[in-house]
Image (spheres, rainbow, N blue to C red):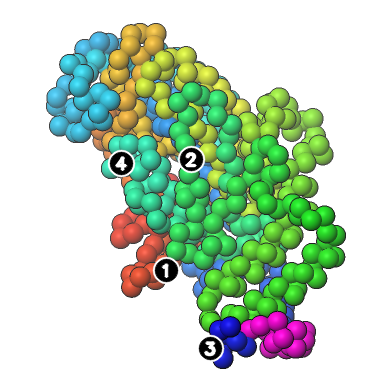
C-alpha cells in the first residue's frame, strides 16, 4: 500500500464516499456546464482564449495531400519551349550546382524530357492545364494556382513531415493539431481533426505514419482521428462488452469523477484530456456510423463525384466524406493520396493516378460551392515537392522523374483565397522560381491566417522553449488573399 497520504486519499473508499455532490463531480459539472453554454451560444469549444486573432475567412480546412510528389510540368506548369530541348542535357547554368538525390546523382547525363501531355487554356483566367485533369481544368476560375512552391527537403519522409508539422524531423505537432489546439471544435459529436487515407493503388505508394497527424507535445486530444475505409471506421470505438449506452454513460460518469479526484491530487492536465477523449468516443459511437452511411446522398451527388464515390477508400469517396465532415463542424480534414512516386513508368502511371483524383477533387469544390460552403472552407491540393524536367532512366515510354524541391505547383480554393488567380512563375525548364516564391512556412502561415490565426502568436511552451508551426519563419502571402 502507498504511504503517501495524498495518493492514499484516492482509493475505492475515498471515491465512493464522495457522492455526486463532491468536489470532483462539481469540478466536472462546471466544465460540462461551460461547454454546454458555449455550444448553446453557437461558438467553438476547447479553443484558446483570444482566438481567433482576427476575423477568419475560413471556418474549416480540407487538405488533399498528394503524397509522393506530382509532376508539376505534366499537369499545372506548361513548358512548351522544352519541346526544342528534347534529349538535350539540362544546362549547368540552370542547375546551378543544386543537389541531386542518390537516384540520379550517378547518371552520366540529365536529358530533358518534355511533357508528353497536351495542354490547353481553360476558364476566363486562361490557365493552362494538361489533359490529365479534364475535370479540374473546368474549375480554374475557382482556384488559385501556385506554381512557385519550394522546400529544402529532397526525400519523401522529411518533405512530407515538413509540410505536415513545419519541421523535417519527427516530433512536432501536425498542422491540424495546431488548428484544433488554437480554435477548438465546432462539433460536439466529432473530433476537430479527422484524417482519411485513400486505398493504395500504386506499387510504390508512400507510407503514411500516424505521427503526420499526431499532436506531439500538444495535449493528445488534438491529434487527428483516422477514419478507416474497411471494418469499423474508428478502431476501438465499438464497445466489445455489449453494454447499452445508458450503462456506458453511468460508467463514464463514475470514471470522470475518479479522474477528477486524481487530477485534484496530482495536477496532471493530461487527465482532463483523457476524460475529454472518453466523452468524445462515447458520442462518436452514434455520430460516426451516421457520418459514414452515405445511402441518403442523392443520385445527383453520386453523379457529381462519380461511381467511385460509392467505393470506400477511393479518393472520390473520401472527398464526399470530407464534405459531410465539414457540414458537421469538423475543423480540419486531411485526405492523403499516396500514389505519386513515379521514378519509372511515369507516362502510364501518372495518367492513372491523375484520373483517380481528378473528378473527386473537382466535385468537392462544386459541392461546397453549391451548398454555400466554399466561401468559408479552405481547400488545398498538393504534394511534398515536385519532379525534375530531366529524365530518370528509361526511354520515351517508361521514363521517370526524380525529386525536385526547387519549384512545384499546388492549388488552393475558397476560404478567402482569390479565385481564377495565378501565383508565382518558374523558368522555362521548370527548375527555378522566377517570381513570388512560396515556402512551406509561407503556405502554413497563410493557411492559419485564413482560419483567423496569427501564426507568430499561436505558440506552445515545451521543455523551456516556445514552439509554433512555422518555427521562426513564414510570411503570409497577402497577394493571394481576397
Residue visible at 30% across and 22% down? 389
Q: Circle 2 is placed at which residue position?
A: 208
Q: How much space separates mark 1 and mark 4, taking CA atoms?
A: 25 Å
Task: Classify 261 as above or below 53.
Answer: below
Q: Are marks 3 and 4 in contact (CB under 8 Å)?
A: no
Between residue 90 and residue 176, name the one nearer to us: 176
Read off the magenta span.
10-24
Q: How much space separates mark 1 and mark 3, taking CA atoms?
A: 33 Å
The x and y percentages for residue 279 are 70, 65
Mark sitting earlier along the chain (2/1): 2
Q: Are marks 3 and 2 in contact (CB under 8 Å)?
A: no
Task: Classify 478 as above or below 118.
Answer: below
Q: Circle 1 is placed at which residue position?
A: 460
The secondary element bearing badge 4 is classed as: loop
Task: Classify 153 as above or below 171.
Answer: above
Between residue 221 and residue 471, name the one nearer to us: 221
Q: Circle 4 is placed at which residue position?
A: 153
The secondary element bearing badge 2 is classed as: loop
Q: Residue furthest bottom?
A: 5
Between residue 128 and residue 111, name the one nearer to us: 111
Q: Residue furthest front?
A: 1
The x and y percentages for residue 296 are 82, 39
Amino acid at each position: 500500500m502507498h504511504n503517501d497520504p495524498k495518493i492514499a486519499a484516492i482509493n475505492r473508499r475515498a471515491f465512493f464516499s464522495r457522492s455526486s455532490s463532491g468536489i470532483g463531480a462539481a469540478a466536472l459539472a462546471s466544465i460540462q456546464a461551460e461547454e454546454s453554454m458555449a455550444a448553446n451560444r453557437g461558438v467553438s469549444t476547447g479553443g484558446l482564449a483570444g482566438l481567433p486573432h482576427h476575423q477568419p475567412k475560413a471556418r474549416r480546412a480540407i487538405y488533399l495531400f498528394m503524397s509522393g510528389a506530382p509532376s508539376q510540368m505534366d499537369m499545372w506548369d506548361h513548358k512548351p519551349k522544352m519541346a526544342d530541348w528534347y534529349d538535350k542535357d539540362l544546362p549547368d547554368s540552370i542547375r546551378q550546382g543544386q543537389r541531386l538525390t542518390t537516384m540520379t546523382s550517378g547518371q552520366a547525363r540529365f536529358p530533358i524530357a518534355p511533357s508528353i501531355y497536351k495542354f490547353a487554356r481553360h476558364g476566363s483566367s486562361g490557365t493552362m492545364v494538361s489533359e490529365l485533369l479534364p475535370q479540374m481544368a473546368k474549375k480554374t476560375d475557382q482556384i488559385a494556382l501556385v506554381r512557385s512552391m519550394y522546400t529544402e527537403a529532397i526525400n519523401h519522409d522529411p518533405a512530407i513531415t515538413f509540410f505536415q508539422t513545419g519541421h523535417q524531423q519527427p516530433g512536432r505537432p501536425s498542422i491540424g493539431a495546431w488548428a484544433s489546439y488554437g480554435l477548438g471544435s465546432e462539433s460536439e459529436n466529432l473530433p476537430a481533426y479527422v484524417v482519411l487515407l485513400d486505398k493504395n493503388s500504386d506499387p510504390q505508394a508512400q507510407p503514411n505514419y500516424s505521427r503526420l497527424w499526431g499532436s506531439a507535445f500538444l495535449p493528445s486530444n488534438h491529434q487527428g482521428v483516422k477514419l478507416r475505409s474497411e471494418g469499423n471506421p474508428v478502431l476501438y470505438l465499438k464497445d466489445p462488452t455489449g453494454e447499452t449506452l445508458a450503462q456506458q454513460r453511468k460508467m463514464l460518469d463514475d470514471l470522470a469523477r475518479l479522474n477528477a479526484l486524481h487530477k485534484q491530487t496530482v495536477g496532471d492536465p493530461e487527465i482532463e484530456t483523457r476524460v475529454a477523449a472518453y466523452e468524445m468516443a462515447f458520442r462518436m459511437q452514434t455520430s460516426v456510423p451516421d457520418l459514414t452511411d452515405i445511402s441518403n446522398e442523392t443520385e445527383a451527388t453520386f453523379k457529381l463525384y462519380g461511381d467511385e464515390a460509392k467505393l470506400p477508400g477511393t479518393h472520390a469517396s473520401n472527398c464526399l466524406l470530407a464534405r459531410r465532415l465539414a457540414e458537421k463542424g469538423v475543423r480540419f480534414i486531411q485526405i492523403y493520396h499516396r500514389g505519386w512516386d513515379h521514378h519509372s513508368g511515369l507516362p502510364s502511371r501518372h495518367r492513372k493516378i491523375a484520373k483517380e483524383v481528378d473528378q473527386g477533387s473537382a466535385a468537392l469544390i462544386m459541392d461546397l460551392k453549391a451548398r454555400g460552403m466554399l466561401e468559408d472552407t479552405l481547400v488545398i491540393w498538393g504534394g511534398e515537392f515536385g519532379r525534375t524536367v530531366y529524365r530518370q532512366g528509361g526511354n520515351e515510354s517508361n521514363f521517370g522523374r526524380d525529386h525536385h524541391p526547387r519549384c512545384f505547383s499546388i492549388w488552393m480554393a475558397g476560404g478567402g483565397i482569390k479565385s481564377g488567380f495565378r501565383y508565382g512563375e518558374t523558368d522555362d525548364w521548370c527548375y527555378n522560381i522566377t517570381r513570388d516564391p512560396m515556402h512551406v512556412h509561407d503556405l502554413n502561415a497563410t493557411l492559419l491566417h485564413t482560419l483567423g490565426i496569427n501564426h507568430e502568436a499561436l505558440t506552445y511552451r515545451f521543455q523551456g522553449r516556445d514552439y509554433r508551426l512555422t518555427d521562426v519563419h513564414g510570411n503570409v502571402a497577402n497577394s493571394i488573399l481576397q
